[in-house]
Image (cartoon, coloured by chain):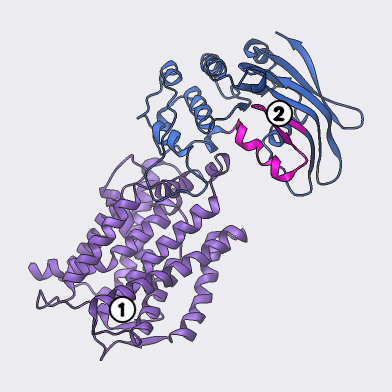
Amino acid sequence: MLEFIYIISEQVLIHLPLMCAAYISFSLLKVPDLSLESAYVAGALYATVLMRYLPLHLQTVSLLGLILISLMAGALVGCMSGMLTRFLSIPHLLSAIIINGMFWGINQIVAGAYISLSGMKNVLIYDLIARHPELPLLIVIGLSVVALLIFLCRTQLCYAWAVFGSSPHFFRYYGISTHYVFIAGLCVSNALAGLTGYLFAQSTGFADINMGVSKTLFCITALMLGKTVCITKKPIMPLIPIIGCILYFVMQQLLLKVGFNLKYFTAVQALLVLIILIMHARKTSNTIDHLGV
Amino acid sequence: MNQKNRNLVITHLSFSFASGSSFFADISATFAAGKIHGIIGKNGSGKSTLFRILQGNISRGETLGGLLQVDGISIDLKDPTQQKQCNRYIKAVVQNIDEMIVPICTVQQNLQLANLPLFPRLRGLPYMHSFEDILDTARIDLSSYVHQLSGGQRQILALLMALQQDAHVLLLDEPTSALDIQNARMVMECVNALAQAKQLVVVIISHDRELVKECVTGTIFEIQQQENGQRKLQQTERI
């Protein structure tokens, strides 16, 4: 049982920044932010490339450096897709697709399609729990991300993101910069996706150009699960991505326990999202809110 | 600041679209502070265009001229940098008020959101002017969610949000068009109270001449189309 909890905790802590990112993009800004997948890959690839040049024996310095570079790589992706949307008036789905294509090439030129971390020191390891040496530092990073999310959710900027998702024309009446709100939202969100990319690469020992595939579906599924449990009238609820992430990995591990083959799990996710959307549409007899999350 | 200085004075206002066609030519009018004024006109007569240019919202290629005096400050409308100042003193509540309010937030949050700076910051929501008397009159609770409010209450909330940044002139585009008589009266009572208490210049545009006659405490103007297509602002009656 304890092992089961350890595994879930690890998975949740690695993916928590990505869930917070998805919450900002999908639930608050309400944009179909496919560029999260590119940000995730960019965060993983650029951080792992940088590992060659960092003094890995200085664990704290290296870890902070790697976190910073993964955040910056993700933010760059978000900033570019946001600027395409706002300054060239391209629908965000299309901007994200363009950025995904662009970064597919850039990532391969800068970092290559596959980077193995074997033989390099794992800076996430802190020997406190024998079978899960990465868990202590993941807890520290996870708690920092939760603290950041709770702080963000109380700020003007976060309210502005929620307002953008609900009433996109609001800002022009009150002299508030819509460009700034939107691009800042995508930068923060994609930066967090980049962080998860690095954490995932570090814990699995490799970074791969295809590692972002279907991450958007994961985010939507987990957010839907979170939203199903955390029913609230409040415009901003930081518990949704946290609870959603926990429920998702509990469900995944339970399916593994009963002998389910995880290669079919993406199909199960898609089915789950479809069922929730159909139930929602029947209940409200209305068109589905953007992305349903 | 004396009463006269708070008036809105338009002198020799002219406006042409990007196509070059002259729309308004040599319009002059004075709107006294503390009163509700009305502008009437047929569909397409240019009421909304007048509101737009009074706020300094000029598109590329359009030309604006004349002088605007508000709160004792003169704004040369020909100067693009000065045009932008109009928006500081003159606020409008559009016909589609749902674009101006956030339905998922509470009344208090909406009032605070209307005070957000150009670049929202990493700190709590800003302070707000609560206009407690008006909220009490309209029976609006600060903790209510916007979707729980009636049409009239939403209109009043939009008004109060427009006034958050110390506007001196309030332009209301068809403020009661979607309301029943009871709600329309409540809204206009609140507008009147605000105009008197804050010495605001309130200008409403409406198709409904009866409503304008009933609510206006200042001057009524009519936009009339000339044979050459230009519009003139004519004072029609004083109440």
Q: Which residue is mark 2?
A: B69
- Which residue is outermost to the bottom? A119
Q: Tag 2: residue type?
A: Gln
**Is B192 on the left or on the right of A115, as rendered?**
right
SS state under label 1: helix
Q: Residues within 10 Å of mark 2 (few under 14, many from 20)?
A: some
Element marked by disc 2 = strand
Vertical comparison of B219 with A262: above or below: above
Quarter assignment of residue A121: bottom left
Locate the N terminus of chain A and report the quarter of the image it occupies. bottom left
Provide residue A120's location: percent of width, then percent of height: 26, 88
Q: Residue at x 32, y 64 (%)?
A: A17
The answer to whether residue A263 shows anywhere in this view is: no
In percent of width and height, residue B10 lies at 75, 27
Q: Is residue B5 above or below residue A281?
A: above
Chain that the image shows in purple: A
Please state the extent of the stretch shown in magenta in the rendering. B67-96
**Left or right of B14 on screen, residue A232:** left
Q: From the image, state the color of chain B.
A: blue
Compared with residue B20, is residue A33 higher up or lower down, i.e. above or below? below
Image coordinates of residue B130 in percent, x first then y, are 42, 27
Residue A201: numbered disc: 1
Q: In the rendered image, which quarter is residue B79 located in?
A: top right
